Amino acid sequence: WLTRDLEKSMQAWIDVLRVGPWRVFRFTDKTVKNLKVGGRLVEEPFEFRIAISSVGNTEIELIQPVRGPMIYEEYIQRRGEGLHHIKEKVPDDQMAKVVKDYESRGVEITQTGQFFADFHFYLNTEPKLDFVYELGNCPYQELPPEMVSIYPPESV
């Protein structure tokens, strides 16, 4: 889900659906390698924030674009906040083959990048499916405390 206010959205999911706590990440031009939007390498500063929580075996991801070029901001401007994509977990050793298969069928990659061991590929499926489809390897990553926080903050 895309949102303009990550904290407000996380709290709403907690209050209404009892989903939480959330792991919150800040992605920037310093932490994401090879961010490409529309096939072009993003060289200017960018930032987006992502909060992740689970409901059973389903991972819920809230994304707030902050600055810079990325598909999230463009989508919110066109369609507003809400569902943006569904993600398929693809093993590392099969990712190139799966991406190539989609490309051979005319499904373009709209954004890709790497956050440490995590790779993502957003596919241009919106014209036919009314949402974006994402491919990713989905590794669980232990990150240093300065790179991830928990919402709501744990009580002292």
Image (spheres, grey):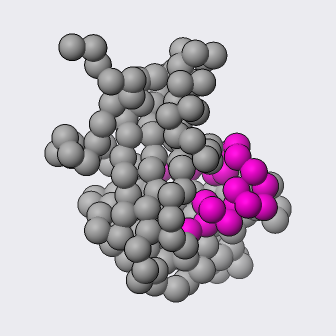
Left or right side of 113 for 105: right
User: From this viewpoint, is residue 84 visible?
Assistant: yes
- Residue at image x 41%, y 74%? 45
Q: Where is residue 148 in the image (x, y as percent from the top left)?
A: 28, 42
- Residue at image x 61%, y 66%? 71
- Residue at image x 70%, y 43%? 82
Image quarter of the C terminus: top left
Q: Nearer the viewer, residue 91 or 37?
A: 37
Q: Nearer the viewer, residue 91 or 56?
A: 56
Q: Nearer the viewer, residue 136 or 60?
A: 60
Q: In this view, does 72 lie above or below 144?
A: below
Which residue sits furthest left? 144
Q: Position of residue 37 (x, y in %)?
A: 55, 76
User: From this viewpoint, is residue 97 visible?
Assistant: no
Please state the extent of the stretch shown in magenta in the rendering. 70-91
Image quarter of the N terminus: top right
